[in-house]
Amino acid sequence: MSNYIFERTKIANEKLRKIVYNMPEFCVDYFISIEQTTSPLTRLNYATDISIFLFYLSNEVLSKPIKQITLDDLNRIKAKDIEFYLSYLTYFEKDGICYQNGERGKARKLSSIRSLFKYLYNNNCISQDESSKVKTPKIHMKPIIHLEPNEVAELLNEAESPTDLSNRQIAFNKKTSVRDVAMLSLFLGTGIRVSECVGLNVKDIDLENNAFKITRKGGNQTILYFSDEVKEPLISWINERSHWLDENSQETALFLSLQKKRINVRSVEKLVKKYSECASPLKKITPHKLRSTYGTTLYRETGDIYVVAEVLGHKDVNTTKKHYASMSDEIKRSVVNKVKLR
């Protein structure tokens, strides 16, 4: 396990313990039961969602402290109560902060509640699972936002030789240009996630075989490959990286911040935003949209949804189909004249 993955897992576990500590005992049992089948980040997300549900019950339904909520209390919860909770999630205040949830946020929180109720029902802790009767909010698919080929070229050109950045940004670019081009090329040429990118170590890169090893969501490791167009900026960055560090430095991260430490996700998001606002000002581009750009291009070129799913690391090909279904008609049209009758 890389240092980055180890630290991320450690932080997630620490946050999880703090949240679960303030929950009723039956929640502790639940999180222990799913420990072997879920990642720390997944459990942390579940804990966050369930803590909001318990907060709602404590303040809006039961008028008692969260830790004093009992299984008898949950046994009296009806499907209608959970539906009211989903409505409550649209806009609520907690610890002085206002929160809003759309259909996706509500669907995820309902899924977390269902997981808890299913565990309690299967272990005879409650007599019925009312959460299973609640319909999942209908999720409307959003159009895929991605960069067109000319915008990809403009994005890389802006990182390499900026023309539209501010004077302050240009000053930073002189220090980071080689790194930025390498990172953007890796995103656009392989479709990796931002967490996978920042987690890369130098030893994970095999320049001889145009390959690199990443740790996917859930902790599984896989090997991906990159083109010579990606290899060239990577070589340039790896050579320059050595000049960023002192001879005795023990830093293993591939991509560094100006503080000569592993770059973090937030910094990468800012970096992508800075250059994309110049290349495509009308589109809100994030690292995930660069991933979508790669997926879109790969699907256009291959027409094979299974290849796209495998490379992007989707466990279920239906996830990929949902994202790229809008392109199916385009592909159907493109093959009209491929089959000749005479």
Image: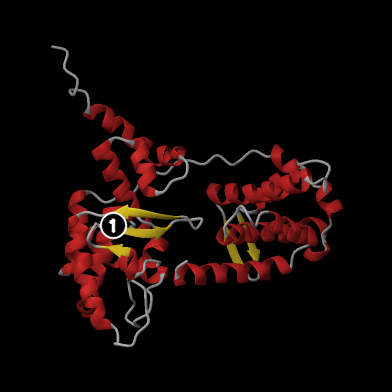
Q: Position of residue 237 (x, y in %)?
A: 23, 71
List the single residue furthest toward the front: 208
> Which of 302 and 335 lies nearest the eye of the viewer?
302
Give me the residue at 37% from left, 75% from top. Answer: 252
- From this viewpoint, is residue 293 visible? yes
| Residue 163 as seen in the image, left or right of residue 137 | left
Q: Nearer the viewer, residue 144 or 111?
A: 111
Residue 57 lies left or right of residue 264; in this view the side is right
Q: How is the image coloured?
A: secondary structure
- Above or below residue 89? Residue 201 is below
Q: Residue at x 68, y 46 (%)?
A: 114
Q: Residue at x 37, y 82 (%)?
A: 250
Residue extending farthest to the left is 342
Disc 1 marks a residue whose amino acid type is Ala
The residue at 67%/59% (across/down) is 52
Q: Residue 55 appears at what percent x and percent y?
A: 72, 61
Q: How many residues crowd mark 1 within 10 Å: few (<14), some (14–19), many (20+)?
A: some
Quadrant in which the C terminus appears: top left
Position in image of residue 224 (x %, y %): 33, 53
Residue 138, image quadrant: top right
Label 1: element kind: strand
Query: In the image, residue 304 lies at what x, y percent?
Result: 32, 35
User: Circle 1 is placed at which residue position?
Assistant: 211
